Image (spheres, helix red, strand yellow):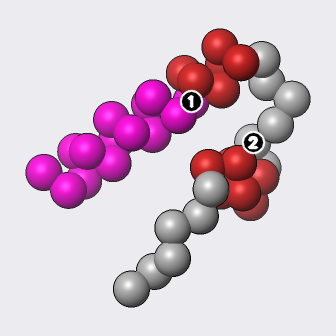
Amino acid sequence: MQRQLPADLILRKHGYPLDLGEGEMKTVLAQAELLCAKWVA
């Protein structure tokens, strides 16, 4: 079983800038949640 990582660590690992504004970060996380929901459906 793979350990769940905090979103900021995953974003940093893949080179996403963590200096995004609050709104932009929420958008990125919302898109990731939708994509993951499609994977498990």
Residue 18 horizontal/vertical position (percent): 82, 37
Query: What is the total number of numbered labels drawn onto the structure image?
Result: 2
Q: Which residue is labeled 1 in the image?
A: 28
Q: Is residue 10 left or right of residue 29?
A: right
Q: Amino acid at mark 1?
A: Val
Instruction: Residue 3: say if magenta.
Output: no
- The residue carrying mark 2 is 16
Secondary structure of the residue carrying numbered label 1:
helix
Q: Position of residue 39 (x, y in %)?
A: 24, 53
Residue 34 higher or lower than 40, as above or below: above
Can you see residue 14? no
**Callout 2: helix, strand or loop?**
loop
Disc number at residue 36?
A: none
Q: Position of residue 3 (x, y in %)?
A: 51, 76
10, 15: nearer the viewer? 10
Work out whether mark 1 precedes mark 2 in sequence or the reverse, and give the earlier one. Answer: 2
Residue range of the region highlighted in magenta in the rendering:
28-41
The CA span between labels 1 and 2 is: 10 Å
Query: Which amino acid type is shown beneath numbered disc 2?
Result: Tyr
Residue that lies at the very extreme toward the top in this rendered image: 23
x and y percent of residue 26 in the render? 58, 24
